[in-house]
């Protein structure tokens, strides 16, 4: 079960981000220009996304939101490691 969750989070960070044009370097690559811009201009963007996904999960009970929360949390963690 945990492995499935991790696979889904990795897909969210790697495949879906590239498909949407957000990032093509993958989870372990450098911060994308978009992520760098958002961190500089809207330092709480990722945290806001986490809150929004929590609210949406509570309303819809869709486990996809839990994966997205984890993916956003990883990006916050990654940014924290770089600082």
Image (cartoon, helix red, strand yellow):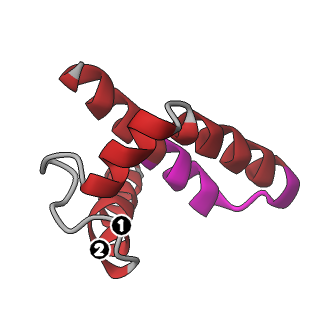
Q: Secondary structure at mark 1?
A: loop
The magenta stretch spans residue 70: yes
The segment highlighted magenta reads: 59-71
> Residue at the spot x=31%, y=52% of the render?
3
Corner quadrant of residue 12: bottom left
The percent coordinates of residue 73 (x first, y second) are 45, 36
In the displayed structure, 22 sits above or below 79; it is: below
In the image, is 80 to the left or to the right of 31? right
Q: Relative to residue 66, is residue 42 depicted above or below?
A: above
x and y, in percent, of residue 35 in the image: 35, 49
The reply, left or right, for residue 30 in relation to residue 45 is left
What residue sits right under mark 1 in the picture? 22
Residue contact at pointers 1 and 2, CB within 8 angstroms: yes
Q: Crowdedness of circle 2 by 10 Å Cα count: few (<14), some, many (20+)?
A: some
In this rendering, the count of numbered labels is 2
At 37% from the left and 59% from the top, the residue drawn is 4
Per the model, the C-alpha gap separating discs 1 and 2 is: 6 Å
Residue 5 on image: x %, y %: 41, 54
Residue 79: x %, y % from top left: 30, 30
Q: Nearer the viewer, residue 62 or 71?
A: 71
Which numbered marker is on residue 67? none
**Corner quadrant of residue 22:** bottom left
The secondary element bearing badge 2 is classed as helix
Quarter holding the C terminus is top left
Q: Which mark is residue 18?
A: 2
Q: Does residue 73 appear in the picture of this structure?
A: no
The structure residue drawn at horizontal position 34% and vertical position 81%, both measured from the top left corner, is: 19
Give the overall secondary structure of the magenta segment: helix
Nearer to the camera, 82 or 71:
82
Left or right of 52 on screen, residue 67 = left
Q: Nearer the viewer, residue 74 or 60?
A: 74
């Amino acid at each position: 079960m945990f492995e499935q969750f991790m696979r889904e989070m990795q897909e969210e960070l790697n495949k879906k981000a590239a498909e949407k044009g957000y990032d093509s370097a993958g989870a372990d690559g450098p911060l994308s220009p978009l992520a760098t811009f958002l961190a500089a201009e809207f330092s709480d963007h990722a945290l806001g996304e986490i809150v929004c996904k929590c609210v949406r999960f509570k309303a819809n009970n869709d486990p996809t939101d839990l994966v997205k929360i984890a993916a956003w949390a990883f990006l916050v963690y990654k940014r924290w490691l770089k600082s």
